Amino acid sequence: GANGRCNWILGKHEMDQAMRTALLALPIFVSSLLNAQTWCPPGATWTYGTDAFGYYGYQQYSYVGDTALGGFTGHRIAGQGAMSYFGQTQVDYWSNSLSFITGLQGDVVTLWSNTDQSWDTLFWMGAVPGDGWLRAPGLYGTCDPLDSVVVMDTSTVILDGMPLHRWEMAQVWSGGITCSTVFTERLGWLLAFEPFPACMIVDGPTGLRCYSDEDISVSFFNFGCGSLVGTTETSTEEQTLVFPNHGNDHFTYNCHQYQPPSA
């Protein structure tokens, strides 16, 4: 389960490391409580752009209610979206009454796995630089072994007048790929609803376009949350870097494409 996964990580630390983590994380917990629900508040809606295998469009996920699973309360998240093939006028619309089930167990945002019938870690909001855990297995297949996510830095960002905590993350696969991405309180992961496997970062979700809930509403995309605009028509400010080039046994894939404002 999710707490088991985090306890496994914490079990690798020495006692003084655990104490340091607890003390450093305390301000995050206190401030998060002042911001009310740190994950999945009423009205929470995420919209992502998609560019995969010649298709482009958007995916939108919305919190629609609660359920009980594995002894914990879960958030039922429905999905919908639209996809179109490059050069074609046909649009394929889809909807799913249940795309994800998440939870908030202490300071751990959890994700329900239908395969394992248990909770896994989607994000650990108590993590400080140096802490890490294995990525939750997702819909896109798994790596062998699974890649890990590691906290590199933390900061605070103000979105729609609300201060939110942000974690700069490195996603590392044993094959040598390091993908840098971001998790922001309430908004979640920058690139997709769940971490995309580092060993499969070729095509896929292209970033958080919009997020809204009962308190805030933010947009990072010039063409509207549900636009079918292809990636070739998006902002030229987007940047994808692979370095070093040429590389031998290791390279870094920097996939910051929709960077929220840092004000």
Image (cartoon, rainbow, N blue to C red):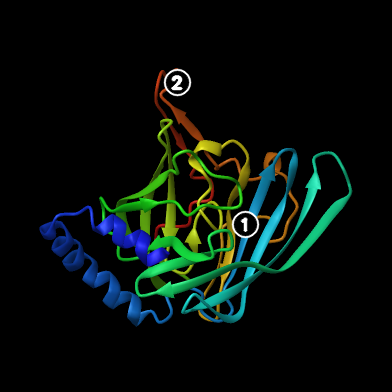
Which residue is depicted at the point 30% across and 52% down?
Answer: 153
Which residue is depicted at the point 57% across and 81% down?
Answer: 66
Which residue is depicted at the point 43% across and 31% down?
Answer: 175
Q: Position of residue 130 (x, y in %)?
A: 25, 50
Q: Residues within 10 Å of mark 2 (few under 14, many from 20)?
A: few
In this picture, residue 125 sits left or right of residue 79: left
Write down the quadrant of residue 222 in the picture.
bottom right
Residue linked to disc 2 = 245
Mark 2–mark 1 CB contact (< 8 Å): no
**Numbered circle sitting on residue 48:** 1
In this picture, residue 175 sits left or right of residue 229: left
Question: Which quarter of the image is occupied by the C terminus?
Answer: bottom left
Say which amino acid is labelled 2: Asn
Q: Position of residue 254 (x, y in %)?
A: 46, 38
- The correct choice, above or below, for 168 with respect to 163 in the image is above
Q: Which residue is farthest left?
A: 16
Q: Position of residue 185 (x, y in %)?
A: 42, 67
Question: Which quarter of the image is occupied by the N terminus?
Answer: bottom left
Q: Looking at the image, tell me whether mark 2 or mark 1 is earlier in sequence order.
A: 1
Whether residue 26 is visible, yes or no, is yes
Estimate the spatial distance between the alpha carbons at disc 2 and disc 1, rounded to whole Å.
Answer: 29 Å
Q: Secondary structure at mark 2?
A: loop
Whether residue 157 is visible, yes or no, is no
- The correct choice, above or below, for 112 with respect to 143 in the image is below
| Nearer to us in this view, 67 or 156 | 67
Say which amino acid is labelled 1: Tyr
